[in-house]
Amino acid sequence: MATEGLLLNKRYKLLGPIGQGGMAVVHKAQDLSLSRLVAVKILRETLTGDPEFLARFQQEARAAANLAHPNIVTIHDFGRDGGHYYIVMEHVEGQDLKTLIKEAAPFSVDYALDLAIQICAGVGYAHRTGLVHCDIKPQNILVTADGRVKITDFGIARALANLRPGETTDVVWGSPQYYSPEQAAGEHPTPASDVYSIGVVMFEMLAGRLPFIAATQQALALMHLREEPPRLSLFNDQVPETLERIVHKVLAKEPSARYRTADQLGYILISFRQQGDALMLGSGSTPAEAQPRAATPTAVALAAAPTVAAPARPANIPAYTPPATPPVATAGPIAETPDESEEGLDWIAVGLGFLAALAVGGLIPLYILVILAYTR
């Protein structure tokens, strides 16, 4: 059905499609009331016949509308015009990350880290407000001309307050290439599920390919559930050993083995970028528990090697400031104690010892008299 030129609720004039997915088509549009460009996401008509889905779609769109973060596309409006259900969003001039990956991946380590940290910032903010994105993938990540990441498509996000532990569903939301093992099993997603999806995106940015490739959705689901991801170094030998371990940890099958939220992953990535391969990752450690270690010769060589040619990180990208986290306790210098043999004898101690000897010696005669008295 042609929608170009369609006017929704006498306000949003559709100018043409700029993207599409399995659930919706996104159009560039003109907001006639405010005289600005916007992006309008229109739900596919095949999905509008389920009242329960529509109610949840509206509920989650309202929750996502409360997200205000520089790395998240702002939602302006939600509405219906006839059979069209739509979400009005901020219009972002840029390319989606999937296009950039196809054009230039594998990325340099620095550029991939820069994008991943911004992704973690936006998704981590959503986690702190009680939302799980559920569909993190490069197609839903926009990159502006100056290198700013904008995460979109929070319309199908799930509110954590509505999730029941152990509950399963017959409808699996998300994209098979990027969803987590628990999503593949029909379980409700958690913040750790988003972390897994971020790990898949990181793998793709650094390797130039997905960790799991299969011909069918069912085969992909089984690979997410059962198979270990290949090592990043098989596809990009410029990836430092510790960064490879970070990505491998994020792609763990069990949610408890990953970082619990995107904020934690973001903190680890910032620490890695600041410290290089000297960052040690303990099993299940949080950012405050990460301890430094000495870099291995192999890791040092990898970190010092020239990076793969890719877009340079824009200098004007604002640094991501993670939420306050207790600082890592560091041991200070140990004070040296003087050698007693070099300081001479402690005469006070000698005097006290002499007095104690006299006291004991004075009791000896009394002890002898008591014995004689009892033996007569």
Image (tube, grey):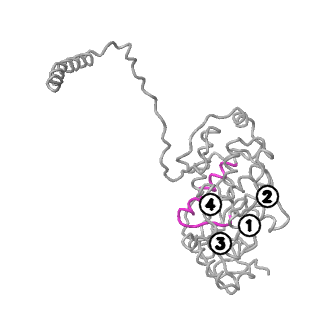
Mark 3 is on which residue type?
Answer: Ile
113 inside magenta stretch: yes
Q: Position of residue 312 (x, y in %)?
A: 71, 45
Q: Position of residue 72 (x, y in %)?
A: 61, 62
Q: For the residues marked 1 and 4, what is the alpha-carbon distance in whole angstroms? A: 16 Å
Q: Which residue is mark 1?
A: 175
Judge left or right: residue 72 versus residue 84.
Answer: left
**Which range is magenta?**
112-135
Q: For the residues marked 4 and 2, what is the alpha-carbon distance in whole angstroms? A: 19 Å
Q: Which-is-in-front pick, marks 3 and 4? A: 4
Q: Who is closer to the viewer here, 2 or 134?
A: 134
Q: Are marks 3 and 4 in contact (CB under 8 Å)?
A: no
Residue 112: image tag: none
Magenta span: chief secondary structure: helix
Residue 212: image tag: 2
Judge left or right: residue 111 versus residue 286.
Answer: right
Q: How many other residues sit within 10 Å of disc 4, few (<14), some (14-19) or many (≥20)? A: many
Q: Are marks 1 and 3 in contact (CB under 8 Å)?
A: no
Q: Which residue is mark 4?
A: 192
Q: Are marks 1 and 4 in contact (CB under 8 Å)?
A: no
Q: Who is closer to the viewer here, 127 or 4?
A: 127
Q: For the residues marked 3 and 2, what is the alpha-carbon distance in whole angstroms? A: 24 Å
Q: Which-is-in-front pick, marks 1 and 3? A: 1
Residue 156: image tag: 3
Mark 4 is on which residue type?
Answer: Ala
Mark 1 is on which residue type?
Answer: Ser
